Amino acid sequence: MSKEQKIKTAAAYKGISQAKLAALIGMTASNFNQKLKRDTFTDEELSNIAEALGSTFVPCSFEFPDGMKI
């Protein structure tokens, strides 16, 4: 599963739109979408995404308190 798919799946799992997720991490929806398509998120940005989703960033995965891993 690509990073883009993981981010989209994690956001859907939490019921958060991409635009809302972008706002939660202080990024415009347009910039977020471009970074998503180009796969240019840094590990720090991925950590921020995970935190905004209430999960933990582990390189190449998102882990939720209920045990769900994406």
Image (cartoon, rainbow, N blue to C red):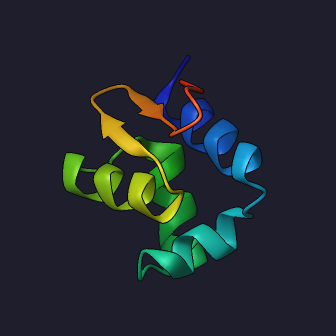
What is the residue that sits farthest to the front in this orientation? Answer: 66
Left-right relation of 62 to 10: left
Q: Is residue 30 above or below residue 14?
A: below
Left-right relation of 25 to 28: left
Count the labels in the image.
Answer: 0
Q: Is residue 15 above or below residue 39?
A: below
Residue pictured at 51% horizontal, 49% vertical: 36
Quarter of the figure with the N terminus: top right
Image coordinates of residue 29 in percent, x first then y, are: 59, 75
Image coordinates of residue 61 in percent, x first then y, are: 42, 27
Residue pictured at 46% horizontal, 47% vertical: 55
State the image quarter where residue 26 is shown. Answer: bottom left
Image coordinates of residue 49 in percent, x first then y, are: 43, 57
Quarter of the figure with the C terminus: top right
Left-right relation of 3 to 12: left
Q: Is residue 52 above or below residue 50?
A: below
Q: 46 or 57, which is in the foreground? A: 57
State the image quarter where residue 5 is shown. Answer: top right
State the image quarter where residue 53 is shown. Answer: bottom right
What is the residue that sits farthest to the top in this orientation? Answer: 1
Q: Is residue 35 above or below residue 4?
A: below
Q: 34 or 6, which is in the foreground? A: 6
Residue pictured at 62% horizontal, 41% vertical: 10
